[in-house]
Image (spheres, rainbow, N blue to C red):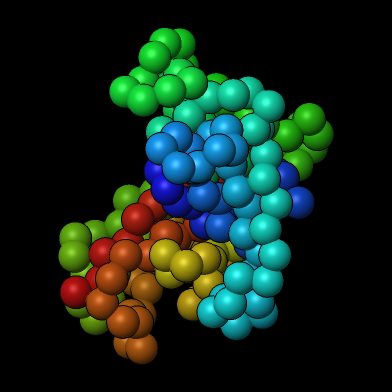
């Protein structure tokens, strides 16, 4: 196992809400390196199905990354055998339907303080005002949903467990650390 991501972007609907798991292969695994998409149960506690991709590339997958703005994902490939024969490459995979990709980020959000305790101050551009405001935990679950009231506002964190969250608006996303 090399690389694990929870895909939450709408750009590739078939992957949304699934775990992406990179598998290197080698040693006792006769199959080539591959990306395994794991579909979870409604409560997120059980793997219900899995599907493998990119085995035909005959490359070992070293890591996975997801672009939070476009939904594209990247796979780092590391040759065909241990200890990593060339070619060492990073490939980008993205949607073929550009209408699914949101507008580019105008300016990132700023969230203060880091870490936040009871409230966090969110600073955004005017383009975010009136638009959606979504806070997700690191499993992708929505823990808060509303609208951006003004370009600067306080977010009440009562009920938030300590940890890392992602705050999404129409103009971009930013990490929120709650202590």
Establish if 138 lies above or below 99.
below
Q: Position of residue 137 (x, y in %)?
A: 43, 69
**101 horizontally vs 3: left or right:** right
Q: Residue at x 55, y 50 (%)?
A: 20
**85 horizontally vs 99: left or right:** left
Establish if 116 lies above or below 88.
below
Q: Is residue 127 visible?
A: no
Q: Position of residue 176 (x, y in %)?
A: 32, 62
Q: Residue at x 75, y 42 (%)?
A: 100
Q: Residue at x 52, y 65 (%)?
A: 140
Q: Position of residue 126 (x, y in %)?
A: 51, 49
Q: Position of residue 179 (x, y in %)?
A: 19, 74
Name the residue at the top extreme.
Answer: 86
Establish if 50 lies above or below 107.
below
Q: Is residue 157 visible?
A: yes
Q: Residue at x 42, y 11 (%)?
A: 86
Give residue 121's quadrant in the image.
bottom left
Q: How many marks?
A: 0
In this orientation, which residue lies closer to the viewer: 40 or 153? 40
In this orientation, which residue lies closer to the viewer: 44 or 159? 44
């Amino acid at each position: 196992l090399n690389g694990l991501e929870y895909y939450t972007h709408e750009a590739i609907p078939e992957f949304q809400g699934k775990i992406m798991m990179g598998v290197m292969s080698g040693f006792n695994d006769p199959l080539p390196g591959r990306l395994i998409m794991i579909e979870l149960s409604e409560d997120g506690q059980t793997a219900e199905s899995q599907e493998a991709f990119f085995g035909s590339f005959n490359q070992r997958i070293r890591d996975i990354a997801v672009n939070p703005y476009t939904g594209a994902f990247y796979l780092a490939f590391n040759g065909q055998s241990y200890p990593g024969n060339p070619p060492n490459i990073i490939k980008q995979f993205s949607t073929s339907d550009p209408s699914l990709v949101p507008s580019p980020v105008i300016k990132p959000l700023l969230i203060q303080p880091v870490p936040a305790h009871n409230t966090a101050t969110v600073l955004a551009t005017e383009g975010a005002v009136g638009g959606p405001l979504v806070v997700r935990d690191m499993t992708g679950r929505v823990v808060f949903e509303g609208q951006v009231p003004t370009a600067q506002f306080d977010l009440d964190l009562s009920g938030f467990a300590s940890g890392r969250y992602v705050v999404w608006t129409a103009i971009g996303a930013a990490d929120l650390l709650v202590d």
